[in-house]
Amino acid sequence: MQVLIVESSPEIGRLWQRHLERQGMSVSLVAGQDEAIQKLQTTAPDLIVLDLVLGDGSAFAIADYANYRHPDTRVIFTTNSSFFSDGSIFQHVANACAFLPKEVDPEDLTAMVEHYGKAAS
């Protein structure tokens, strides 16, 4: 399974990347919109783990581009804010499949990635 992580915090991103790779997944880690769009132009990940509040760029632009370029690629959003905690993210982003707190346990994130990645296959 190919996973793209778009995470502004390098420490969190590397933690998630290492954990997913230990489970046999191929993982690319980028920090912002430009890098994510470049990756999406050359690869079709099975799933994207996407920080809702990026330091560089727009998570919505990335999700929208992924939906256009790779319609089967689903997105798990993560955030440390309460914005969209009402679940309305699913009304705004067609390829959103989950919404998790950024403090998610890496094992729980891995389970979600495995579940939604298999569902997309």
Image (cartoon, helix red, strand yellow):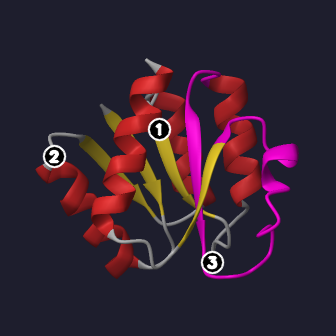
Q: Identify which residue is drawn at 43% across, 72% down.
A: 104
- The residue range painted magenta reads 70-96
Q: Position of residue 10 (x, y in %)?
A: 37, 77
Count residues near mark 1 (Cα–Cα under 10 Å), then give few for <14, some for 14-19, many for 20+: many
Q: Quadrant of the C terminus?
A: top left
Task: Establish if 40 lies above or below 110.
Answer: above
Q: Position of residue 20 (x, y in %)?
A: 24, 52
Q: Which mark is residue 117?
A: none
Q: Could you tell me the amino acid type at mark 1?
A: Leu
Instruction: Identify residue for label 3.
Output: 55
Q: Which mark is residue 23?
A: 2
Q: Is residue 21 magenta?
A: no
Which of discs 1 and 3 lies nearer the camera? The answer is 1
Which of discs 2 and 3 lies nearer the camera? The answer is 2
Judging depth in this view, the residue of 117 and 57 nearest the camera is 117
Going by the image, does 6 lie left or right of 109? right
Q: Which mark is residue 47?
A: 1
**Sooner in the amino-acid sequence: mark 1 or mark 3:** 1
Q: Secondary structure at mark 1?
A: strand
Task: Establish if 11 lies above or below 5.
Answer: below
Residue lying farthest to the top in this orientation? 121
Mark 2 in CB contact with mark 3 (< 8 angstroms): no
Q: Identify which residue is drawn at 34% across, 39% down.
A: 114
Mark 1 in CB contact with mark 3 (< 8 angstroms): no
**Sooner in the amino-acid sequence: mark 2 or mark 1:** 2
**Sooner in the amino-acid sequence: mark 2 or mark 3:** 2
Count residues near mark 2 (Cα–Cα under 10 Å), then give few for <14, some for 14-19, many for 20+: few
